[in-house]
Amino acid sequence: MRADPVKPRPPLDPSAATPWRRLDPRFYQIAVLSGLLIYGLGWLHFDITPDRAALLLSTALLTQYVCTKLWGLPKFDPKSALISGLSLCLLLRTNFPLLAIVAAVITISSKFVIRWNGKHIFNPTNFGLVFLMVVGAPVWVSPGQWGNVAYFGFLMACLGGLVVNRAARSDVTYAFLVSFAALQFGRAFLVMQRWPVPLHRLESGALLLFAFFMISDPKTTPNSRAGRILFACLVTAFAGFIQFGLYRTNGILWSLAILSMAVPLIDRLLPGVQYDWSRVRTNPQPQGVPDEASSGVRQPALDRPALG
């Protein structure tokens, strides 16, 4: 008696993926940042008013819309602008509303203006903050306004985002956090500081924002995994020089802004496939089907706004 032939399994249909696998990770990031801002305004008394937060967010969205029209992009996508605006609400402090508007405009427009090989060079929020500090504007970054409950809650939400959304850039976040912790504890050991000192430096809301929403920006980090790990370690090392050698604050912000200009060189030395937001919402490509890396064909570089 002859057995029936085994029918080949049909190829996976990306549309059949579960909804949470198709969800754009930026929606989760917007929800986390929005929840933190609301909690900070309502219970932690962040030193920013609701009016100032509304001004930053509306300016960021309006700038995104104007740039979308000026650059002739297919549609207006507010997700990236919301992430950048929320990050500015949590970090940027100034006594002048006009400077808040300028910061939001510079932040969003930088990713349209300063580009290389289909990618924007700088993380938008990082560039907006550092640019204003470079020109001597009366602005500052507010890193320590969280409290233990908000800090650990935000940490768990960020780690959950890496697991749930799988944005394909968790390697650079982990590499930075491990190397930064090693830097802090290593220096504490060398100068014989008590262990609560480096622990206090690690319990910073600004550090979490930097690790999970700035240095992990898929559109500004190197394309290859080896390049991203190298980049994270370089950012940590240069931040340590700025903090402990030059005795300046905001070392990680300065370091990221300066070393972001080296990303094109890292991509040249350690090449990889350029990140595409649409890939995180579908299943991986079946084996044997060429992608742009294997076929040598580069897809048109439409603007898919980046994180933070």
Image (spheres, helix red, strand yellow):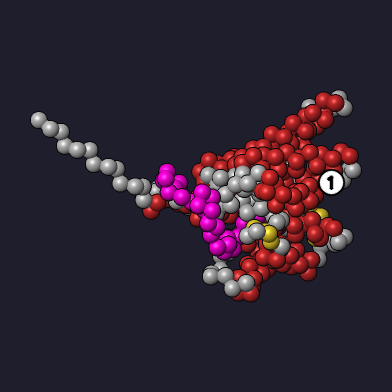
User: Is residue 180 visible in the rendered structure shown here?
Assistant: yes
Q: Is 152 in front, or is 122?
A: 122
Q: Which residue is mark 1?
A: 249
Dividing the picture into quadrants, the one containing residue 5 is top left
Outermost residue, front side:
296
Q: Residue at x 53, y 40 (%)?
A: 163
Tell me if residue 113 comes above or below residue 7 in the rendering.
Answer: below
Secondary structure found at label 1: loop
**Left or right: residue 89 compared with residue 28:** right
Q: Amino acid at mark 1?
A: Thr
Q: Residue at x 34, y 47 (%)?
A: 11
The magenta segment is 283-308
| Residue 84: image location, x then y, percent | 66, 58
| Residue 286: image location, x then y, percent | 41, 46
**Left or right: residue 65 compared with residue 125:** left
| Residue 144: image location, x then y, percent | 76, 45
How many numbered marks appear? 1
Per the picture, the main secondary structure of the magenta-coloured stretch is loop
Dividing the picture into quadrants, the one containing residue 77 is bottom right
Q: Residue at x 59, y 73 (%)?
A: 72
Outermost residue, left side:
1
Image quadrant for the N terminus?
Answer: top left
Check disc 1: other Cα within 10 Å, few if <14, some if 14-19, many if 20+: few
Dividing the picture into quadrants, the one containing residue 27 is bottom right
